[in-house]
Every structure is written in structure tokens, then in C-alpha cells.
Amino acid sequence: MSSPTASPSTSATGRASKDRPTRVRWKMFVLMLGVVALNYIDRGSVSVALPLITEDLGLSKETTGFVLSAFFWSYALMQIPGGWLIDKFGPRRMASGACVGWGIAQGVTAASTGVGSLLGYRLLLGAVEAPVMPAGGKLNAQWLPAKERGRGAVLLDGGAPLGAALGGIIISSLIAWTGSWRTSFVIAGVATVVVGLLAYWYVRDTPREHPAVNEAEAAYIERAHAEEDAEAESADERTGLRPYLKYRSFWAMCLGWMGFNGVFYGLLTWGPLYLSETKGFDIKTIGWSTLVIFGAGFVGELIGGWLADHWRSRGAGANTVMRTLMGVAGTAVVAGLLGVVLVPDALTAVLLLSGVLFFLRWAGLYWSLPSLLGGRANAGVMGGAMNLAGNIAGIVTPIAVGFIVGGTGSYTWALLYFVGAGVLFTASSLVLDYSRRLSVR
């Protein structure tokens, strides 16, 4: 149960308006960074262990594609219901409950005995992980002024490349230490449950509910939200998803996130096997290469968020900032992927993929869009819709790559598939209007 809402008159000592604002909001987003990082360690663990799992369970390339895709079937299906539940019950319960649930699912994946059970556990993992990112988008809306949401969005979403980077080292090291991919999954699952309980203890739905937030910080956030609402064309009230379906920006948001995930999930799911089969990397080298590639994405994401908020603070318009940053990022991603196709050297491929992830993860700024376009009241369901679209790419991409690689015996056309996804991300980002909340009158 959430802590009782505190009014200014009953706030704890230290909440006097004369106090310097506390910075609880940033501590909470650092915690959410850790939660999302664990999310990606767990969901990407199958990819890191894939050379061992395919040998252990005898999986073909086509079957491997379905296994990698299975997570996204249930994950995508639960996005909009999860977003609706977040708007209704709050992000604290949904995010922490999801974390505990997927830790359990991660652990029981170790019991897989064949394709059927492995598919089943991956479906379970996807279903229970579904609320975490929309919940983060809701926290971004509830806790941050508009001018800070870029940094909040990339702190939240930065857990994805951080988890993918650390996951390669952590899972491969656990496998080397225990001698078993199964035992490493159990250890990762237990750690995730512990972090989920920590998130429930610390996270609150709104600033006024958090015992460590003083009056100055709460008033600062509320004042910024009041100014934001005064400039909007419609009131900040729950309306559901339907009123937004008529807007170009809604669809551009969804398609842009789909294009982004077509690249990111493709590299997350098939990247380790690509390095193993085309560059001759062993499991240890895969782990370190994954750390470098996705670590570059984490650094790039933080820099992208800082650039956006800094540029906005200097008076630049939202469209100027976002269209410029997303245009630069999309161009760099497409160019880098084409370079990987053309350059066979292993070291160069790792460096190019690191550059691709550095710029690709600027798209983490998309997690400021649910509140920007839908307001705080609808940020959960808007984030769920965006993530549903993105995870359609998560469903299609691993299967498509499996058939492409299995049919051609090469990863060349798979990389060109990623180029097409990068073009979709870039084009959608350039037509999206970032300057106003969508009217639902």
C-alpha cells in the first residue's frame, strides 16, 4: 500500500518552503535505471547463452528465431492493458510487482527441457515484464517538470543498453563460474526479486507521497505541472487511448519506436550469435564485445538526454531540438549499419556497432513523449501503445532474421533489414510534432 498523501501543513520536518529542494526524483530514477537494467539482463540472457542453449536443446536457426521472438509476443500483448492498469493503480505497484514476477520467471527458465518449455517460459517472462517501461513513463510524467523529462527519459531507458552491456559479462561470467547456463539463470532471477522488493520500498506514485521529499521539491514540481497544464489545449484528465488515434503525431510516435526497436532488438537478440558465427568469437569474447557495444549505447543515451534538456533550457523549441537530434541519430545509425555490411574485419565491426548503439539510444528521449502528447493522466496508456508498436518489431525481427539467415546462410540481408528499420525510425521522428499536448476535446 502506498504511503498516505501528505499535505503541506502536515509534512515532516524539513519540508518547509524555505528549504533547498531535495533531489529524491533523481534518486528514484537512478533506482529505475537499475530496474530496467535488470530487465534487459534477464531478457537478453538467452541471447548471451544461445550458443550453449542451441547445442543443449538442439535448436535450428528457424526455431531459434521463434524462441527469441516468443518473449515479445506476450510482452507486446500486455502493453496497453498494462498501461491502463498503471494509470488506474499507479506505477509503484505495477513496476515493482513486474520486477518480482519476472525474476521468478527468469529463474524457472532454467528448468527448460526442450523447445516447448523454453517457449513457455519466455512467454511468461514477457507477460510479467510488460508494465515496467510504461510505468517508468508514468513516473516521468508525475515526478518531473517538462524541462527535466529528457534526462529522466534517458535515465529510465538507459537501463536497456546498460543491462545489455552488463548482461553479456554477467551471464557469461556466471556460466563460466557455475559451468551451467541453467544455474546462472537462477542466480539472476533471485537478484531480480530482491531489486523488485527494493523498488516497492522506495518508489512512490507522486512526490507528495514520498517521505523524503521536502516541501520545496514538491512545490517546485507542482508549480511546473501547473504551468504545463495552463499552456495545454485540453485538461489533464484520463480519457483512454481512442481520442489520440486521429493524430499524426500519435502514429509517428508508434512507428518511430517500432523502427528503433527493429534495430535494437535485432542486435540484442541476434548480435551475440552473429559475432560467434561470422567473427569466430567465443563466449568470453562475446561477453566483452557486448559490453563495449551496448556500453556505448548507455553513454550515448545519457549524452542525448543531456543535450536535449540543455538545448531546451537555452530557449530552443521542442521541434528544433527533437527533430535535429533524432535526425542526426537516425542518419548515423543507417550509415553505421551499412558500414558493418561492407567491412568484414571483426574489430571494425565491433567499433561500428558501438557507434550505431551510441546514436541509436538517443531514441530514449521517446519516453518523454507519452506525457508530452497525452499529459500526466494518460501517460501510462500512451506509453503502453508506443511500446506495443515497438514490440511488434520485437516479435517480427527475431523470426525474420532467423529465416533470412537460415535461407541465405549469411547475415548480410539481416543487416540490411536493420537499415530499413533505421530509416523508419528517422522518417517518423522527423514528422512528429513535439511542441504541444494533443487535444482530446
Image: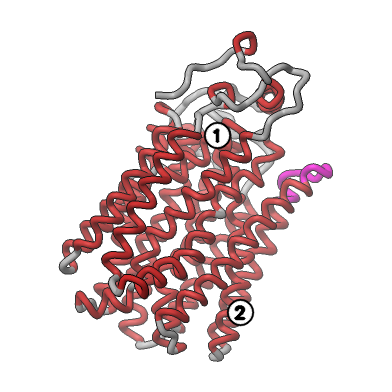
Residue lying furthest right: 314
- How dense is the environment of label 1, judged by Cα within 10 Å: few (below 14), some, or many (20 and up)? many
Q: Main secondary structure of the magenta part?
A: helix
Q: Position of residue 34 (x, y in %)?
A: 51, 50
In the image, the segment drawn in magenta is: 312-321
Query: In the rendered image, which quarter contains the C terminus?
Result: top right
Mark 2 and mark 1: Cα distance apart in space:
38 Å
- How dense is the environment of label 2, judged by Cα within 10 Å: few (below 14), some, or many (20 and up)? some
| Residue type indicated by callout 2 | Leu
Query: In the rendered image, which quarter contains the N terminus?
Result: top left
Q: In the picture shown, does residue 145 fall above or below 222?
A: below
- Judging by the rendered image, the residue that carries numbered circle 2 is 351
Residue 318 in the magenta stretch? The answer is yes
Identified at 53% across, 84% down, the residue is 341
Q: In the picture shown, does residue 126 fall above or below 149?
A: below
Identified at 56% across, 91% down, the residue is 345
- In this picture the colour scheme is secondary structure
Mark 2 secondary-structure assignment: helix
Identified at 16% across, 64% down, the residue is 116
Q: Position of residue 366 (x, y in %)?
A: 58, 49
| Residue type indicated by callout 1 | Gly
Mark drawn on residue 374: 1
